Amino acid sequence: MNSSKRIKKLLAGVAAVCVTASALPAIPASAATLALGDIDLDGAVDVFDLTMLRNYILQREGSELSGNSALTADVNQDSLVDIVDAVALSRSIVTGKINYIETAEDITYIHLNGSSITVDGTNAVADGSKVTISASGTYYVDGSLTDGQIVVSVADETADTGTVKIFLNGVNITGTSQPAIYIENAENTSLNLVSGKTNVINGGTAAYAGDYLECAVIHAKDDMTIKGSGTLEVNAPVQHAIHCNNDIKFNGGTVNIITETEDAVRGKSSVTVKDGILNIEAEGDGIKSSKGDVAIEGGTVLIKAGNDAIQAETTIDISGGNVTASGDRGLTAVTGINITGGTVVATATDNQATLINATQGAMLLNCIDDTSNTDGCWKKANAISISDSITAKPLKKFKYVLISDATIKNGATYTLTNESNGSTVTHTSGASKTFAMSAVSTEFNSVNLGTTSQTETVDGY
């Protein structure tokens, strides 16, 4: 076996060890301190860094390391970047033990001071309660703004192809008359949620106008990623909460979104959830891709929506994670809903999900009217368990339920129980107390959840 093949085999083993490891806490807020192994300089040491290091060692095109990325790649600090560093990095990810290096890192600090902003570093200029970032790099933001804005405006993203990395270090920003965070021009921007910190972003009580007409509280005209291990709360009284003209990705952290009139997350090209917790309560749509697809690959997604919980102009692709999507319509896609993994519960008041293409078991329950409610809907307290192994807990009232999980098998038979009152669930006008899967996706009609719980007050939402 030649040396290249030996390296590839060893790196494959290293990657396998780390595949389930979670990100470590963010680097300390010191301009001279970096975490060894944080090769992509996003504040966390994780499998993404290991992938970059592996590509560099294998000399793959576009995998060159420079500057502080090269410094942090030398995990064992022997002045070489090689397979030994890959092994050391994998151990850091698995054990959580990490070392730091003192560098000349150029981190720009942006301090929000109510109605003013101060900047310590380069490529960011403050003007009253507005700060404009003009180049890729690392920016730590702390403090509060009562009515202000962070703008990303890289003059020529073709010449500056780097990522603008904004670390939200416990900020509280209200964008009364303009988006609180506005990405006007940049190749890539990441919002990094610093570990242990809660960041609150608020919209105003009046619709944005002029140049910001129809903008969201967080608005990006180019690609944007939300990641890290902290918390982001977005409150949008009259605006969309988060909007991206291109691709938006959720790679980590806890993101809580409340909208009172509009949509929660909108990505024109695509919306992708890879990791983290996304908790949405929206009067409009929960997650929407107006031109492309929605992909959920991992993490936890909880949506309570006044319209569609998840909507895509092309496909909804769910391959992992835990998804609960409750809306007037649960899952809506123009060309198909593909479920290949994860645990999915989608409930609706208006109609059952259609165009289902599942490679794992999916039950579609079309319920009879609950005669105790004037609209015929069942209260959200009526959780449904499947043979004591899976429990579907709707987030709002419903008439239609989709449940999909790898444990639901074609050809198997299940009993369903209404956990709110212990009733056995029946279908086909009470003719059957068992649910036999006759196909990978099986639809059951006239589903009766039994005597409804009288302990919950109907709130219409």
Image (tube, rainbow, N blue to C red):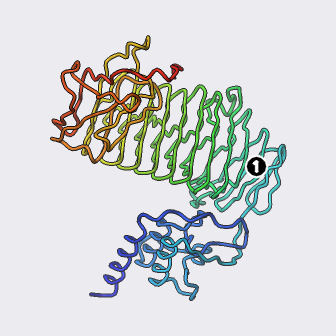
Question: In which quadrant of the rendered view does residue 59 lie?
Answer: bottom left
Which residue is farthest top? 374
Q: Write the residue at 45% across / 27% down.
A: 380
Residue 435 in the image: above or below residue 114: above
Q: Position of residue 79 (x, y in %)?
A: 57, 87
x then y, percent, for residue 185? 62, 48
Question: Quick check: 79 above or below 214?
Answer: below
Q: Is residue 386 above or below residue 90?
A: above
Which image quarter holds the N terminus? bottom left
Location of residue 377 in the rendering, given as x and y in whole percent from the top left corner: 41, 19
Tell me where residue 374 appears, x and y as whole percent.
Answer: 44, 11
Q: Is residue 79 left or right of residue 301?
A: right
Q: Quadrant of residue 106?
A: bottom right
Amino acid, disc 1: Val
Give the structural element (helix, strand or loop) at label 1: strand
Instruction: Give the residue at mark 1.
Output: 131
> In the figure, 286 relative to 195: above or below?
above
Please name the residue shown 63% across and 43% down the image. 233
Front-most of residues 147 and 368? 368
Q: In the displayed orientation, state which residue is furthest to the front.
A: 422
Q: Residues within 10 Å of mark 1 (few under 14, many from 20)?
A: many
- On screen, residue 403 versus residue 323, left or right, reads left
Residue displayed at 67% across by 44% down: 181
Please indicate whether residue 86 sits to the left or right of residue 443 in the image: right
At 54% from the left and 51% from the top, the residue drawn is 225
